Amino acid sequence: MSQDTVSARDIARHLPGVFKRFPAIARGYYYYSVKRDRKQLTLGTLIERNADKYGDRPAVMYEDRRLSYAEFNAWANRIAHYLRDRGLGKGDAIAVLLENRPELLAVVAGAAKAGVACAMLNTSQKGKVLAHSINLIEPALIVVGEELRETFDGVRDQVTLIHPDPCMFLADCNTLNAFGEAPAGYINMAERVSSFPATNPDLADPPTLGDTAVYLFTSGTTGLPKAAPGSHRKFIKAYGGFGLMSLNMGPDDVLYCTLPFYHGTALLVCWGSALAGGSAIAMRRRFSASAFWDDVRAFNATTFGYVGELCRYLLNQPPGPGDRDHRLTKMVGNGLRPSIWKPFKERFGIETVAELYASSEGNIGFSNFFNVDNTVGFSTAPYKLVKFHDGTRDPVRNAKGRMEEVAKGEPGLLIGEITKKWSFEGYTQKEATEKSILRDGFKKGDQWFNTGDVLRQIGCGHLQFVDRMGDTFRWKGENVSTTEVENIIDGSGLVEEAICYGVEIPGTNGKAGMVTLVPLAGKAAFDPDRLFRYLEDNLPPYAIPVFIRVAESIEKTGTFKYKKVDLQKAGYRPDSDAVYAWLPKTKGYTRLDDSLVAQIDAGKVRF
């Protein structure tokens, strides 16, 4: 564990940078702290304001496409008018199944102007998991990109869509110039939208700050994704807190984002930050380490959005003369490990790392406002770090039934106090919301949001991320639900019982998925390739277990709970069990031996 600390001297050393951006900080704080739910301050009004102020400046960049704020606002307006014409309005929702491209942002912006919330479907999901996500919202309509039509067609008869003609199609092209041809059973959305006016909607009951703008999906202990409503306030907080206070974005800035826009980091943080400065958001369909710096130069990017894994991939690329041949000096995101923080900054010439901690559903966030190394920064929200039961997300309660804070510097479970100012928007499922609330923690009647994450205090109110506990872990920039994986495996007909957990691999970020299972037909008859094919059909790639341990039985406690901590400690070493690994660039599981384990331990296998 890193022993980094933040001292008063560290803060003082960064004060000149704070003073330099003070005007932006003052403006940002207004947006970050705005309270009135009924205020007409929304994603749509931000875009309209930028269209008025920066109309000719670029708003969205993608491949060779460039859209000005005026053009983008007009496009969003036509979509808003179209949705209203189809009978949708405030309180309705649509599902969005599109990969990263300008159409995604236009749909979200247009829906926001109409008062319609967008459920941002994870494009890696398929089968039962995708159907579950859609049905959580019961949207009126769904917007399906050509690139994901087969995926949606696979679950179309399993989902509930309220509108009588609910399926809208967007061709995988520049739909402002070409409509493409919609398949049978779909409406060609681009063609229909093109006939509507480009003027700002004038609604009798316009959307406001407290209204739901998006639904973001998160993994959790229920075993399947949960839908977390995100109000316009979340865009506004990102606009003020990250775009202005931390990054000091301006109209000459370009924020390059390869993260999927169904994630809050891309949609809320990165896009919100770009909007704050009248800056452009430059999108790529998906991350490519080899193309990253070429894109940065092509877009003339000054800022980029990251998760820690992305930075590790870039750092693993061979050094070259182009490492500093760019004007990118700022980055915003989460999960940058202390071990690569300084090497990354020094190699690529990064000056500002706006590391953050937040969750789609949570009521608490941290931001590295002072640009100090190796920290998620501080928070103005009320929170505590408390003692927890090892291997779980459950806090320790003392004899009086109260939680206890950890000593400074010790890892503790992060909990955020739920107050009127720091409300918890929760999930669409009341039961899931209730499970995330801790009551009577320090006094009768108090309420706390349980993040399930372990952090530690490193000085001057600054925290450092330590681990994600309980029934989720993070791999390839995604949160993986252990229960979801277990449920899918249980449905295979191949196993008697299975337990999923995360294990660490040297030289990687997060934890790789591992399953210990008891085969239904016995160890000798177990077919790892058959299981892999099943998992590939039913799980997104990041959730497919990297390791499989095949056992005769799985040890349990006296209360029939699996000893997950012991299994995690055993890791992927075969011992008396057969252990298989999904090695990079393979299409199945390979049985591990001592030689392969040694290569993995030495970091020679690049997961």
Image (cartoon, rainbow, N blue to C red):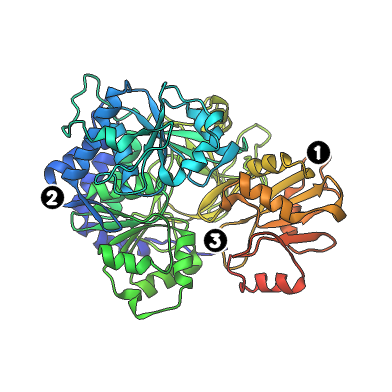
Marks 3/2: CA distance?
A: 41 Å
Q: Mark 1 Cα within 10 Å, few/some/many (few <14, many 20+)?
A: few
Q: Quadrant of residue 420?
A: top left
Q: Nearer the viewer, mark 2 or mark 1?
A: 2
Question: Which quadrant would the N terminus be assigned to in this image?
Answer: bottom right
Q: Earlier in the sequence, mark 1 or mark 3?
A: 3
Question: Which quadrant would the C terminus be assigned to in this image?
Answer: bottom right
Q: Quadrant of residue 268?
A: top left
Q: Circle 2 — which element?
A: loop
Along the horizontal axis of the image, is 395 left or right of 207? right
All told, the count of numbered labels is 3
The residue shown at (50%, 38%) is 152
Q: Mark 2 Cα within 10 Å, few/some/many (few <14, many 20+)?
A: some
Q: Looking at this view, is 178 or 398 the one in front?
A: 178
In the picture of the structure, the residue carrying the numbered disc 1 is 560
Q: Looking at this view, is 354 or 445 the one in front?
A: 354
- Kindly check if marks 3 and 2 are in contact, taking CB atoms under 8 A apart as contact: no
Give the amino acid type for the residue marked by disc 2 in the picture.
Asp
The residue shown at (43%, 63%) is 288
| Residue 56 - label | 2
Q: Circle 3 — which element?
A: loop
Query: Where is 287 relative to 560, above or below?
Result: below
In the picture of the structure, the residue carrying the numbered disc 3 is 509
Query: Where is 489 relative to 85, above or below?
Result: below
Marks 1/3: CA distance?
A: 32 Å
Q: Mark 3 Cα within 10 Å, few/some/many (few <14, many 20+)?
A: many
